[in-house]
Amino acid sequence: MKVAAVAGCIVLAAMSFLAIAGTGSAAFGVHIDLTKTRSSGICISETLSAGTGATVYVVCDSGQFVDIAPTPGRPFTGVHGGAYRYRFSSAGYEGQAGDAADPFIGAATVTAMRVYHADGNDGRLEMLVSF
Amino acid sequence: MKKLVLAAIVGITAFLSSSAQAQTVSTTFNVNINLTTACTLTAVAPVDFAYTSFQVAAATATGGTFSVSCTNGRPYTLGLQAGNGAAVPPGAASLNITDDAVNLAYTLNLSAAGATGTGVAQPFSVTGTMAGGQSGTCVAGGVCNNIATGSTNYIQTLIVNF
């Protein structure tokens, strides 16, 4: 089918068209060569990490897999958030935040959650949130 | 001898008599010419786009040249029609098309809306523009050509109305 179409195009291109009193027409082809920018690649940006509510646009070819993740071992700079500890007891739980939890801020994943002794009343739930 | 002279005199007299009676007859007649106007349209060179995904600037097509020869003095107009179906005059001044293979939108225009025939070929072109910022679709790496990847709407039609 494609061969026939191309052949037809070649025939059309090889001839002139004579029209008498009225209308004449000729078909023509539109050829498009599309070059892809990159088939794969990594972009690194830390410029927006110090702000909140940042919006990042990622534009790729259709059919391309897009993964957004922090660079391993390199947390966002200008961390917001903090470490939070929740202590469970028979009376319920109380929250404790900030320095009292001795949070670690450095190379880490964006978010982390650890559960200590969650099987007893004295168990604690610690959460580190970075953004 | 007398007979001979007499015969000569008679002959000359007869000749002179006939010359004096020559006349001219003439008549006029018309030359009727029915001229049917006609136009010839050369093949249109392919309209070629070279585009890179997400390029900022709009792309301008190359090619698309053609010429029209119409009867001297005969005005004519040009039009475009999407697809390669039967021409439906007068056609449009421009076309907005999205190629169904590489998924890129483009616009076709004409270098002129028409002209008056001069009896010789007059050059024109189909111009094309493709807006920047488009992604396009290209499964394979490198370069994708719309025809090679199965475009079904890459053929358009040029119409001459006169």
Image: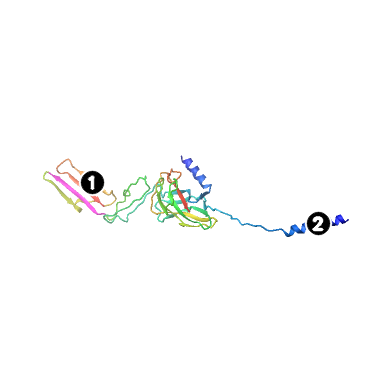
Residue A94 relative to residue A45: left or right: left
Residue A7 horizontal/vertical position (percent) = 50, 42
**Residue located at (16% from left, 49% from top):** A95
Q: Amino acid at mark 2?
A: Val
Q: Is residue A50 magenta?
A: no
Q: Residue A113, which numbered label?
A: 1
Above or below B155: residue B111: below
How many residues crowd mark 2 within 10 Å: few (<14), some (14–19), many (20+)?
few
Q: Nearer the viewer, residue B72 or B60?
A: B72
Characterize the magenta stretch by its predominant secondary structure: strand
Q: Which quarter of the rendering shows the N terminus of chain B? A: bottom right
Q: Residue furthest right?
A: B1
Q: Secondary structure at mark 1?
A: strand
Q: Which residue is mark 2?
A: B10
Residue B79 relative to residue A123: left or right: right
Above or below A78: residue A61: above
Q: Which region of the structure is painted magenta?
A: A79-89
